[in-house]
Image (tube, grey):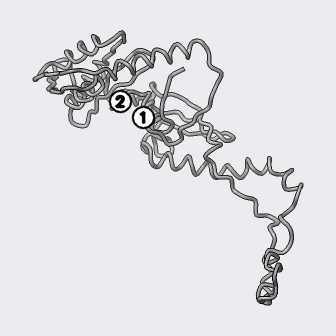
Amino acid sequence: MGLLVASGSVLGQTSSSTPTAQPAARGADTALLVSVLNQRVSEVAWEEEPFEKVIDWLQTQGPINVVPHWKAMELEGITRDTLVTVNLRDTTVREVVNQALEWVREGTAVVTFQGTGNTLRISTQNDFNREENFQVKVYDVTDILARIPDFRGAPEIDIEAASQGGGGQGGQTAQLFGGGGGGGGDDDDQQTGQEFEQTNPALDALRLVIEDTIAPTTWDTYGGKASIRVFNRQLIIRNSIDVHEKIGGRFVIE
C-alpha cells in the first residue's frame, strides 16, 4: 500500500509535455501530500479503536484532504466501526496509515490509498481498479528498444579462403568476411523506413511482457478491460493508477 507518486517501475520514462501553471500547482500539492505522509510521529497507541478514528486522526496531520470511500469499502465488509489496533513509536504518518489499513482488511479485500494533488483517497483496491477510474498515459519507449540490425546484404564468409589460410596469411585474416562493411549510403537512406518496421516486433514483445507480468487479468488480451496499444515507438496504456505505477513509476494526473 502506498501513495501513487512513489513506487518502482518497468519503463521509468514517459512522454513529456510542456509544463503549464496548472500541472505545476498540482505538483506542489503532491509535494505537500508527500511531506505530510513523511512526517514523524512519536507514538500511536490504538487498541480496538473504530476505523473512522484513523481517518479523523489523519485529517489533523496537515493541510490535506482525506476522502474515504465508505460505500465502496462497506460493500467489502469494511465500515466506520471496523476495529483497528496499532501500536507504533518513532514512526511516520505513512507507516501508521499502512498499519491501520492492513489491520482492517477483510478476507480478500485490500484497503489502500491514492493521492491526487493534495487529496488522499482511501478505499479498496477493487474500487480503485474499476474501469471508470482507469487513466490513459502514453509511454515513449524509444530508449529501451533494442534496435534490430539489418543483415540484408551482409558480407559472406569465404570458407575456402579461411581453410587455406596458414600462419603466413598475415593480414588476409581480415578478409574472412570478404568485402567491405555493407551497402554504404543506400542502406543509410533506407534506415528510417526500415527502423519503424523493425521496432514493431520489439514493441509487441514489450507489450506482451507487460501484459504477462503486471496484473495479467486486467488486460483485454486476457479478457479484462484495460488495454495497451502500439503507435510508432510509443505504448498507449489504459489501466488503473496502481498498474501505471508498476509500469512507469510516479503517476501524476494532469
Alpha carbon separation for disc pair 2 and 1: 8 Å
Task: In the rendered view, tell whether residue 93 sits above or below residue 10.
Answer: above
Q: Position of residue 215 (x, y in %)?
A: 42, 42
Task: In the rendered view, tell whether residue 245 sits above or below residue 39.
Answer: below
The three-letter code of the residue at mark 1 reads: Ser
Q: Which residue is mark 1?
A: 7
The three-letter code of the residue at mark 2 reads: Gly
Query: Which secondary structure, mark 1?
Result: loop
Question: Could you say which is closer to the camera, residue 123 or residue 251?
Answer: 251
Question: Could you say which is closer to the camera, residue 135 or residue 250?
Answer: 250
Q: Report the disc number at residue 24.
A: none
37 left or right of 55?
right
Q: Residue at x 41, y 29 (%)?
A: 130
Q: Are marks 2 and 1 in contact (CB under 8 Å)?
A: yes
Query: Which secondary structure, mark 2?
Result: loop
Mark 1: few/some/many CA within 10 Å (<14, 14-19, 20+):
some
Q: Earlier in the sequence, mark 2 or mark 1?
A: 2
Pick the quarter of the image with the C terminus.
top right
Q: Residue at x 35, y 18 (%)?
A: 36
Pick the quarter of the image with the N terminus.
top left
120 left or right of 109?
right
Q: Position of residue 201 (x, y in %)?
A: 64, 52
Q: How many marks?
A: 2
155 left or right of 17?
right
24 left or right of 179?
left
Q: Position of residue 197 (x, y in %)?
A: 73, 50
Q: Residue at x 89, y 55 (%)?
A: 185
Mark 2: few/some/many CA within 10 Å (<14, 14-19, 20+):
some
Q: Which residue is mark 2?
A: 2
Point out the residue furthest to the right here.
Answer: 185
